[in-house]
Image (cartoon, helix red, strand yellow):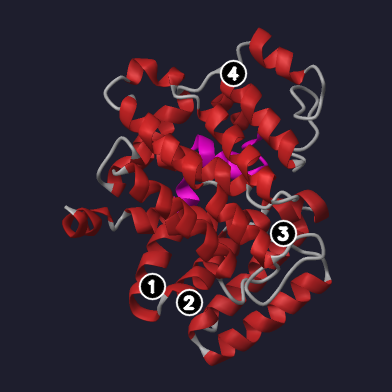
């Protein structure tokens, strides 16, 4: 896929995700957090454009050289995007989005069809190196995100972890796989992105064609939340609370979600409830962004016809 097209899809996905209203428990166009606001997320989505373009270019460069995919530098690309965001925004607004969108961009630079992406992403992830893992840890620490939580070994915040990654030859795929049993974003990146491709993308594509972009964004978010308990909530408040939030999302979907008047009313109440209790389904928002991006990449054939 064209590099500029891929980068624009990444930027579009980032800004549409945060614009979805009402996206319960998250920043959206009419709701800010105390420490980060709607405009911070817009800035972040725009700021990653150059790095996402570079990611697609890198994918194109190594497309026919799978034996050299260890040279792609996926970890460095993630670190570059986080660094660029940090120049514009003081808070961690998009680490999870960057971690998801960067391998998508690399893979998109290798293919012309969305149905080829998943396999390429998996191969790219498995071809990463210990240096990619080091750069990922540095990106997590720069974003001050807490990363994958405190671990007995290879803790992202431990001073000796970076050396251990190199000494023990642990690549980025392996270090994420360590966390995949409890962190759904890590699982996504080590299991061919099932939430993005099997849940989010189909919902966004279908709803957008019938009801429009905002409805598709919110319904995608709600669908993902209903099926995948949010890691950010479970990390802070426990798995039981995360399952409760997912169950609540499912009950709203049964009433139509944002596509019905009753569902809209329930969504607004759900948003208030989550905000009042400090429950932020942030990982769900990340998956929503990756789902939107894949949906826009799916329009590549139309893009080529229009611009060629």
How crowded pointer 4 is (Cα within 10 Å; few <14, some 14-19, many 20+) is rated as many
- Front position among marks 3 and 1: 1
SS for tag 3?
helix
Give the CA distance from mark 2 to mark 3.
Answer: 24 Å
Magenta segment range? 178-196
Q: Position of residue 243 (x, y in %)?
A: 69, 61
How crowded pointer 1 is (Cα within 10 Å; few <14, some 14-19, many 20+) is rated as some
SS for tag 2?
helix
Give the residue at x 50% y 23%: 128
Give the CA distance from mark 1 to mark 4.
Answer: 40 Å
Q: Residue furthest top?
A: 167
In the image, 232 versus 70, the foreground residue is: 70
As drawn, 92 above or below 217 = above
Q: Which residue in the protein does label 4 denote?
A: 131
Give me the disc on residue 242.
3
Q: Position of residue 105 (x, y in %)?
A: 42, 41
Residues at marks 1 and 2 touching, judged by CB atoms closer than 8 Å: yes
As drawn, 36 above or below 273 = above
Of the numbered discs 3 and 1, the one sitting upstream in the chain is 1
Instruction: Answer with left or right where residue 221 lies relative to residue 119.
Output: right
As drawn, 268 above or below 142 = below
- Front position among marks 4 and 2: 4
Where, by quadrant of the figure, is residue 176 drawn? top right
Q: Position of residue 182 (x, y in %)?
A: 67, 42
Q: Which residue in the protein does label 2 denote?
A: 215
- Front position among marks 1 and 4: 4
Instruction: Answer with left or right where residue 216 lies relative to residue 98.
Output: left
Of the numbered discs 1 and 4, the one sitting upstream in the chain is 4
């Amino acid at each position: 896929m064209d590099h500029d097209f891929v980068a624009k899809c990444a930027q579009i996905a980032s800004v549409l995700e945060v614009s979805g209203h009402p996206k319960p428990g998250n920043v959206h166009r009419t709701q800010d957090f105390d420490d980060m606001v709607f405009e911070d997320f817009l800035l972040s989505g725009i700021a990653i454009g150059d790095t996402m373009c570079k990611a697609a270019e890198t994918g194109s460069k190594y497309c026919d050289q799978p034996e050299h995919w260890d040279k792609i530098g996926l970890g460095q690309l993630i670190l570059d995007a986080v660094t660029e965001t940090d120049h514009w925004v003081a808070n961690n607004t998009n680490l999870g989005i960057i971690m998801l969108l960067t391998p998508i961009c690399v893979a998109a630079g290798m293919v012309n069809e969305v149905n080829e992406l998943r396999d390429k992403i998996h191969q790219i992830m498995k071809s990463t190196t210990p240096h990619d893992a080091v750069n990922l840890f540095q990106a997590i620490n720069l974003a001050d995100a807490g990363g994958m939580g405190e671990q007995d070994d290879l803790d992202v915040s431990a001073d000796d972890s970076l050396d251990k990654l190199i000494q023990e030859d642990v690549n980025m795929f392996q270090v994420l796989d360590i966390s995949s049993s409890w962190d759904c974003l890590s699982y996504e990146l080590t299991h061919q992105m099932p939430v993005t491709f099997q849940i989010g993308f189909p919902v966004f594509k279908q709803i957008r064609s019938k009801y429009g972009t905002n409805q598709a964004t919110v319904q995608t978010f709600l669908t993902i939340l209903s099926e995948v308990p949010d890691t950010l909530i479970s990390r802070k408040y426990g798995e039981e609370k995360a399952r409760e939030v997912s169950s609540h999302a499912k009950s709203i979907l049964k009433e139509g979600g944002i596509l019905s008047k009753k569902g809209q009313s329930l969504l607004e109440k759900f948003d208030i409830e989550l905000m009042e209790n400090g429950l932020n389904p942030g990982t769900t928002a990340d998956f929503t962004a990756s789902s939107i991006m894949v949906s826009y990449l799916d329009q590549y054939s139309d893009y080529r016809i229009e611009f060629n």
